[in-house]
Image (tube, rainbow, N blue to C red):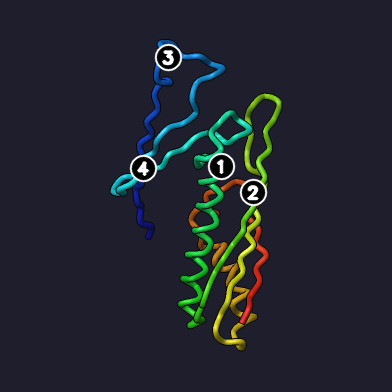
Amino acid sequence: MSINHTFKATVNWAINQGESTFNPRTFSRNHEVTIANKTSPLQISAAKPFRGDDSLYNPEDLLLSALTSCHMMSYLYVCAQHNIEVLSYTDQSEGDLEVKSSGSGSFKTVRLKPVVIIKNANQKELALRLHNKANALCFIANSCNFTVSHKATIIV
């Protein structure tokens, strides 16, 4: 039996202030995304290579952060199932985006590199193996059509 959940977001964009017509070369890529039931909207732009504001989040940042966060939450879940006490978790993930001459593009791979500190040295190997289980459970990774790899480090 499956259960379906619906998530909602609203995007708002408008022409640059002071411009009366849309200019295809200089239009602002900055916009706001509001997530249902959240208090603060996200200020988003295109990535810098695509004429966006580098100080704002971009869709590529958000995809990478969603994957990284989802893997961590899935990992903490499976560790809890196996009574592994996780003391800290950090990840400096990377994703490779390929842009074709046509202007289309896609992520080709994301590399997760979690560093996990656990309390019990006897659980180190199990803690390492559980990243495979977390990857299999991650909703976001299961929704991607590119490779999501992980190279974890476990520290006691």
In this view, which residue lies farthest toward the front? 18
Q: Position of residue 71 (x, y in %)?
A: 53, 61
Residue at mark 3 to residue at mark 2: CA–CA distance: 36 Å
Quadrant in which residue 31 is drawn: top left
Q: Are dots 4 and 3 in contact, CB under 8 Å?
A: no
- Residue placed under numbered mark 4 in the picture: 41
Marked residue nearer the N-terminal end (1 or 4): 4
The answer to whether 68 is drawn above or below residue 49 in the figure is: below
- Residue placed under numbered mark 3 in the picture: 19
Q: Are dots 4 and 2 in contact, CB under 8 Å?
A: no
Q: Are dots 2 and 1 in contact, CB under 8 Å?
A: yes
Q: Secondary structure at mark 4?
A: loop
Q: Are dots 1 and 4 in contact, CB under 8 Å?
A: no
Q: In this rendering, would 7 be left or right of 122?
A: left
Kind of residue indicated by mark 3: Glu
Count how many numbered circles sit on residues in the image. Answer: 4
Q: Position of residue 94 (x, y in %)?
A: 64, 52
Q: For the residue carrying disc 3, how many other residues have a C-alpha within 10 Å: few (<14), some (14-19), or many (20+)?
A: few
Q: Residue at x 58, y 72 (%)?
A: 116
Q: Nearer the viewer, mark 3 or mark 2?
A: 3
Marked residue nearer the N-terminal end (2 or 1): 1
Quadrant in which residue 34 is drawn: top left
Nearest to the observer: residue 112 or residue 31? 31
- Residue placed under numbered mark 1 in the picture: 60
